[in-house]
Amino acid sequence: MIFLVSLVLALFLLIYGIVKLKIHPFFVLLVVAILYGFMTGMTGAMVVESINTGFGDILGKIGLLILFGVTIGVILEKSGGAMVIASKILNIIGEKFVHLSMLITGYILSIPVFADSALLMMNSLNKVMSKRAAVSYAGTTAALALGLTASHVMVPPTPGPIAAAGILGANLGDVILWGVLVSGLALIPCYFFAKKIASKIELPIVIEAEEAKGKKPKLWLSLLSLVIPILFIVAKSIMDYPSIEVRPGFLSGVIEFLGTPVIALLLGVFLALLIPEKLDEKIFSATGWFGEALRVAAPIILITGAGGIFGKMLQNSGIGDVISGSMSDINIGLILPFLLAACLKTTQGSSTVALVTTASIIAPLMPALGLESAVMKAMAVLAIGAGSSVASHVNDSFFWVITQLTGMDVKQGYQIQTLGTLIFGVSAMILISILTLFVN
């Protein structure tokens, strides 16, 4: 009983510290992990060992992945490559299908670029497209925001899903493949929500003068840093399936090396450097693009490391055996990570914090929940991702970016963003539950 009481108290302290006291999640996770260790009877030596191994092990696996993924996104954003990709998608789909254009554009952009930044980049274009097509600005904004949310919580190399996959030991290629499938299908009801429901909300369009346009990078160059790493990661994942026999050779050796996530994303950084016309200190210096990437990645890496400490503390306390015994007759499976992530997202606002924290708590419980296979580990990451999108409201920075940028009031924000993310998260979880009936 002491383990369960300690866990509930630890979760309460986590939420209270982050939400009420406004303490940085890194310090809250670290301190609460230490308190939990002592509450469950761990010795000082065991607590220290859990801190060192939990922090070191998880960052050794995914610290560089997060940094490289963020770096690719910063380069794409600053060089104009992300906008070139967005413009091409809009041109292909056309003004007649502006909701679909915004949904797909947001979905693709949010893989390398943070959702907040992508929304800032796309808002002006969204206004222009909405006015030209004579459709509701509220509807197209909903489509764009939900597209951004979907890949942000489910598709690597976005940092949150990378961190969750690393903590749970899920194959990154599996997470990409299943993540694209689940998040893509879950956006279908979101599309109709944006077009049929959100579009009924009146939101005036105020178009400001367009900024002067510089020379745009080429589309194929802009896509290289995204497509090539993902192809190599997926190819290696396919090669690693037990049912597939691959003969040793030069090609398989290249895929084995370049398909390793850390090498694939490092390759993506080098490919992204082909986009700028000139490579100078504006890119490489501490105050340049690389410096900005480090500043953006550092908090995520530290929070992930603290999540690793919390997870290791839970594991070393023996709570997994306790949960295993108490849940032996209950088929709760993926529902627990989904609900836990949803609670954390709703109470503290950040999807990334919800992803990392939930994965850290669930990691030692995976055997007890029946989530030990490679496929179920990937599904667990996606279930956490689905929960971490439910539901964006006033304590989420993305909620305020959307409302302030578009001129929505808080009520409209709830009607569009909060309801939309609820629809996405629940739809994704339903799809995951159906898929596990066939692939478990």
Image (cartoon, rainbow, N blue to C red):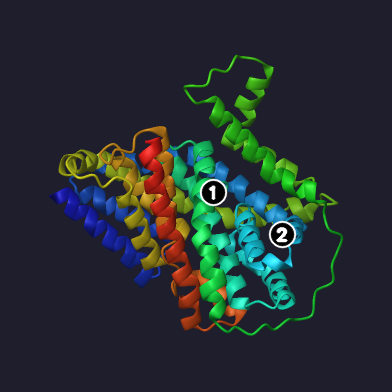
Question: Is 117 placed above or below 219 here?
Answer: below
- Label 1: state its secondary structure: loop
Image quadrant assignment for residue 386: bottom left
Q: Amino acid at mark 2?
A: Ile
Instruction: Quickly name the residue at label 2.
Output: 93
- Front: mark 2 or 1: 2
Image quadrant assignment for residue 365: top left
The spot of residue 404 in percent (x, y) is 58, 79
Tell me whether the residue at label 2 lies in contact with that at label 1, contact meaning CB atoms closer than 8 angstroms.
no
Q: Residue at coordinates 33% horizontally, 64% vertically from top-left? A: 15
- The answer to whether residue 26 is visible is no
As drawn, the label of residue 155 is 1
* The residue positioned farthest toward the top in the image shown: 248
The spot of residue 358 in percent (x, y) is 36, 52
Q: Amino acid at mark 1?
A: Val
The spot of residue 325 in percent (x, y) is 16, 40
- The answer to whether residue 7 is visible is yes
Image quadrant assignment for residue 314: top left
Is residue 367 toward the left or the right of residue 301 in the image? left
Q: Residues within 10 Å of mark 1 (few under 14, many from 20)?
A: many
Q: CA distance from mark 2 to mark 1?
A: 22 Å
Is residue 276 toward the left or the right of residue 439 in the image? right
Between 240 and 260, the one nearer to me in the picture = 240
For the C terminus, the image quarter is top left
Is residue 294 toward the left or the right of residue 324 in the image? right
